[in-house]
Image (cartoon, rainbow, N blue to C red):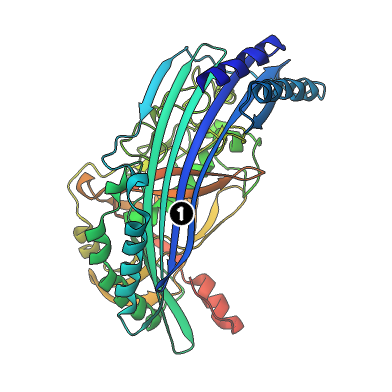
Amino acid sequence: MKDLARLALDTAVQRGAEYADARLVRYRNQNIGTEDRRVSALADTEDVGLGVRVIVSGAWGFSGTCDLTREGVQACAAEAVAIAKASATVGGKEVQLVPEPRATMRFATPYQVDPFTVPIEDKVGLLLEINDRLLANSGVKKAHGHMTLRRADRTLLNSDGSDLESEVVTTGVSYRATAVGEGDARSRSYEPPSRTKGYENINRDDLLANTERVAEQAVEHLKAAECPAIVTDLVLDPLHLALTIHESVGHATELDRVLGMEESLAGRSFAVPSYLGNLKYGSGLVTFKADNTLPHGLATHGFDDDGVAGQSWHIVEDGLFVGYGTSREVAGEVGLTRSTGTCRADHWGSIPIVRIPNLLLMPGKTPLTPEEIMADTKHGIYIEGMGSFSIDQMRCNFQFGGDAFWEIRDGRRVRMLKNVTYQSMTTEFWGSVDAVADERFWVPNGVLNCGKGDPMQVSQMTHGAPTIRVRNVKVGAAAEVMRQSGAGSEV
């Protein structure tokens, strides 16, 4: 198969490409869904193809094919060159890649159990057993489970002389209980972190052990008190923070988005290059580190689709904005001599674009437990799990929900709440962080379905965090508007 990638590369260069890369990828995916006591979805797919990317006269050309004959590969490479030549006639700024030394690498996700060797009846059986346990609570009327298993085997050759191979295995599982009654429906979910690990990441004992709690909290959510519209303190758990980090920091610091090259899906950013080293993105307790070498991180793939090895660097350090995620194309725009290595495509038929790295809110430097943070909070709201979100075109004004909410009074959780959303501005929110739990309580949660681009591409990345506290945040405004208008609301 590597011979086909080499043929594509040679064809592109012979036809006039100043730079070329050939990316041959084989995907294997299993997605299993259950609803109540039946299987609602079962897909097992395999897909293999080639993507060829070239630069001619300072313009990109790209083409992909699943015709892996010699003729098909040569035609794909020729089409990529033809597209680049046509693009060059339009004019505009020429593409200039920052240098990257030639490299040879073989990367593989460390795992113990190949998820595709586990019998499908065992996977389905686990999800159905979870649903059975959720439905054992008479207040739960619907139960859903989902399992995602992925493998991507990738070969990347480029005209700089790099010869790179990777095998990345990803596993994740989640379930949800929905309680119905009193003219309302409320849910509670459990989704332990997805990781680049084998089937050992699907922890049967843990999944089953949490079913009773999840079912009970779904029923409790149904009967919970309405969230008032107030300004209060928030205590946020790591599983919740993944989405807040993703939307307000991850997407805001993708350099192609900042430069106006990628504007789909709320696509600009306030974090412009003049703010590098000058903007207080958060309080002094807030440090965001990008790390595409993180063991079992969802964006830990050995190297990106520019052929740049995984690295670690700071996006925000002690509250100060200091870095971006980049590709070889855009890194030079902020004076970098090497890309940070965050250029990825979601498929052999997609052109690589800048994607969020594994982006981590680093733990506090002094010993502090989530219980101590809670005990030190006189009045506030504790939020677990991810929920809804909304964010403006500049990644500045936002609103987030969650999966479960409790009022904090005099340092204790006293009652569950519903219809909780909080509203803030990115730098105001992160600037109000005044407590960060230590490394013992840091959890590498992640996102499997990050959408970006037009046509949209879907990618994955880890967002680790500990429990934190944020002072004086506006909550409940959205629900208050809905109540005043006489409409219902569920978050």
Q: Position of residue 215 (x, y in %)?
A: 32, 75
Q: In percent of the image, x 60 and y 38: which residue is there?
A: 257
Residue 190 versus residue 82 in the image, above or below = below
Q: Residue furthest left?
A: 367
Q: Position of residue 268 (x, y in %)?
A: 62, 43
| Between 134 and 37, the one nearer to me in the picture | 37
| Between 153 and 173, the one nearer to me in the picture | 153
- The quarter of the displayed image where residue 299 is located: top left
Q: Can residue 352 be spotted in the picture?
A: yes
Q: In percent of the image, x 46 and y 67: which residue is there?
A: 421
- Reading the image, the residue beneath label 1 is 31
| Between 422 and 64, the one nearer to me in the picture | 64
Q: Secondary structure at mark 1?
A: strand
Number of residue marks: 1
Q: In percent of the image, x 28 and y 69: which residue is there?
A: 211
Residue type for callout 1: Asn
Residue 373 versus residue 453 in the image, above or below = below
Q: Position of residue 486 (x, y in %)?
A: 59, 85
Q: Can residue 277 be spotted in the picture?
A: no
Q: Position of residue 392 (x, y in %)?
A: 60, 53
| Between 33 and 67, the one nearer to me in the picture | 67
Q: Residue furthest bottom?
A: 182
In the displayed structure image, the side of residue 437 where residue 313 appears, left or right: right
Q: Residue furthest right?
A: 89
Residue 375 versus residue 96 in the image, above or below = below
Q: Residues within 10 Å of mark 1 (few under 14, many from 20)?
A: some
In the displayed structure image, the side of residue 271 where residue 358 appears, left or right: left
